[in-house]
Image (cartoon, rainbow, N blue to C red):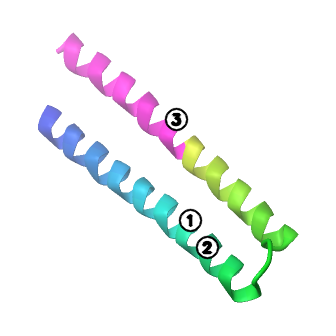
Amino acid sequence: MRDTVLQRLTKLETQLLGESNASRAENSDLRQQHGQQPSLEAVRERILSGLRVGKQSRLVQAHQSSDSAFVQTQ
């Protein structure tokens, strides 16, 4: 049970890091394409993306807490 939980969390963490890196690369590409600062829309999307990643990270932490509490009660 615990190994399964750890595998799921590792997979989620890898996915989150991948999304974060993809977002960074995309923003870098936008700056290079336009030769200037990214548009307001690009900045807005970057902020929202960061908020989603932060929310997902908090959800992972909540699952870790509940999973460890569940394992301890068995």
Q: Is residue 1 left or right of residue 54?
A: left
Q: Residue at x 63, y 52 (%)?
A: 50
Q: Residue at x 42, y 38 (%)?
A: 60
The magenta-colored residue range is: 56-74
Name which of mark 1 and mark 3 comes first in the sequence. Answer: 1
Q: Is residue 1 visible?
A: no
Q: Main secondary structure of the magenta part?
A: helix
Amino acid tagged 1: Arg
**Image x and y of residue 10, in percent:** 27, 47
Which residue bears the numbered disc 2? Answer: 28
Amino acid tagged 3: Arg
Amino acid tagged 2: Ser
- Label pair 1/2, CB-CB below 8 angstroms: yes
Task: Return the residue found at the far front.
Answer: 35
Q: Is residue 8 left or right of residue 18?
A: left
Within 10 angstroms of label 3, few (less than 14), some, or many (20 or more) residues?
A: few
Comparing 64 with 73, the one in front is: 64
Q: Residue at x 70, y 77 (%)?
A: 31
Which residue bears the numbered disc 3? Answer: 58
Which residue bears the numbered disc 1? Answer: 24
Disc 1 vs disc 3: which is toward the camera? Answer: 1
Secondary structure, mark 1, is: helix
Disc 2 vs disc 3: which is toward the camera? Answer: 2
Residue 69 position (above or below residue 62) = above
